[in-house]
Image (tube, rainbow, N blue to C red):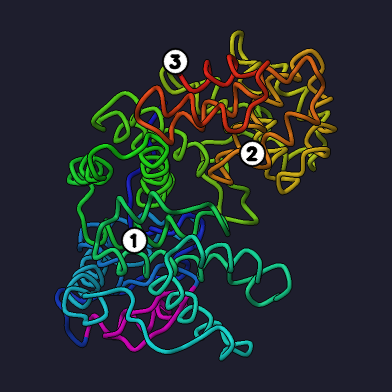
Amino acid sequence: MRPLRRWTLVLVAGLPLAGCGGGATEPSERGARAFASAGCGGCHTLAAARTHGTAGPDLDQLRPDAATVARQVADGGNGMPAFRGRLSAGAIRAVAAYVAAATRRSPVSATAFRPDGTKLADCRRDVTCYRQAFGNLVYAHGPREALARLDAAGRGNSLIQSECHQIAHTIGHAAYARFHGDAAKALSLGSMTCWSGYYHGVIERAFAGVPRGKVPALARRLCTGLAAGASTFVTYQCVHGLGHGLMIYSGNDLPYSLRVCDRLATAYDQRSCTGGVFMQNFLPAPMAGVRTRWLKKDDLLYPCDAVGARDKLYCYLMVTSRILPEVGYDWRRAAAWCRRAEGGWVATCFQSLGRDASGFTHQRARRIVSICRVAGALGDDCIYGAARDVTSNDAGARRAKVLCAAAPARTRARCFEGIGTILGGFRTDRAARRAECDAVTPVRYRSSCYRGAVA
């Protein structure tokens, strides 16, 4: 795979930096005039310029270096036009130096979130109020509660629904502040609510101002910073979130993100990180903005059928998140695409289908079972993928065991095996893993749960 042209100014995947250019060779009047005349403030917040744009990243929080800004202004990408040819090389260098110096000096960059007394009940059709209120909720009670409240509020509030991605960013910023810059802990407690906005917010803070060449070393430290003895489930959540973050940081540079994953500490971390990378790559454009270039209209399995063997597993485990929006959530058409997967990866694609069936139905057992019928003889793989997703979503098997009971008898052993793969990650010793399975699994299926839990 050929690498994309490298740029990192667009940290928020899919939120365009349209219309930014201008310059000054140092933080000067020339730089301020160029920033203003090019319309950068319409998209970006920059305290020094007194602008409050929200379509693109908050530059005070991002704190890009001059080289990063110059590359993005010159080459464009993710919705931003290239200014090479429109601006002189000197002007591009000028605006880059202005933004870099202005954000280094900005008091806003010192901390992305400051709690206050604002509550959700105080907000009336005011996005700024909602962002602060949800951030306060995180700061007081943690990100899981805030993300769950955001998901629920978005169903009945059109403003929250339309702005939920940016609100989730703020939740990420607040979590980073709550945990005093411990990005590993913040990432491990996240979710993909509102198209990964939470992960975006955490990574904005963790990678703010970090040159691309230093990102691999930082990424390697982030999740190994979890407390010794942390469950594999928590570690997975962290490195999966890191995979999302690498794509966000790099502007959907898939090869670069995979290379950074490859430099993580363990094979488990490396593989799990690729799951976040591919999930971010597959986010639908209407939800996440401009699509990555690592998709093809005429091959909905791409790039899974093009990446190296070591990266195929998590690509195929995520690929139906790419397929389903393209086929209008026609599950039979999606199943047909799975059957076209490379030899040895068809079953994995159907596990992905089950995972998406779980999310699509909000983990409702009978609807999942109905959808998985389209998998035919591979229905057990679909149920297996769904059982894993339900268990992971709930951090427990309360609803997953209901799914197994509702599933066709021939698929139940595989269903409980799927539950076991997640439950096993909650405990570090074999006896505790078996106890987790015993608590939720009928006797006749316990060996299947043990197998999944490696117990």
On the question of residue 383 being in view, the answer is yes
On the question of residue 289 being in view, the answer is no
Amino acid carrying label 1: it is Glu
The C terminus lies in quadrant:
top left
| In the depicted structure, whether residue 35 falls above or below residue 432 | below
Q: Secondary structure at mark 2?
A: helix
Residue 205 is situated, as x and y percent measured from the top left of the image, at 30, 63
Q: Secondary structure at mark 3?
A: helix
The residue wearing badge 2 is 321
**In the displayed structure image, the side of residue 48 where residue 19 appears, left or right:** right
**In the displayed structure image, the side of residue 221 where residue 294 appears, left or right:** right
The N terminus lies in quadrant:
top left
The residue wearing badge 3 is 309
Report the residue at 59% width, 9% height from top.
Answer: 344
The residue wearing badge 1 is 204
Q: Residues within 10 Å of mark 1 (few under 14, many from 20)?
A: many
Quote the CA–CA distance across marks 2 and 3.
Answer: 20 Å
Q: Quadrant of residue 332?
A: top right
Quote the CA–CA distance across marks 1 and 2.
Answer: 25 Å
Residue 20 is situated, as x and y percent measured from the top left of the image, at 40, 70
Residue interval drawn in magenta: 30-54
Amino acid carrying label 3: it is Ala
Say whether residue 53 is magenta: yes
Which of the two labelled residues, at mark 1 and mark 2, occupies the earlier sequence position?
A: 1
Q: Quadrant of residue 393?
A: top right
Which of the two labelled residues, at mark 2 and mark 3, occupies the earlier sequence position?
A: 3
Quote the CA–CA distance across marks 3 and 1.
Answer: 31 Å
Say whether residue 252 is magenta: no
Q: Nearer the viewer, residue 362 or 302?
A: 362
Report the residue at 14% width, 76% height from top.
Answer: 26
Amino acid carrying label 2: it is Ser
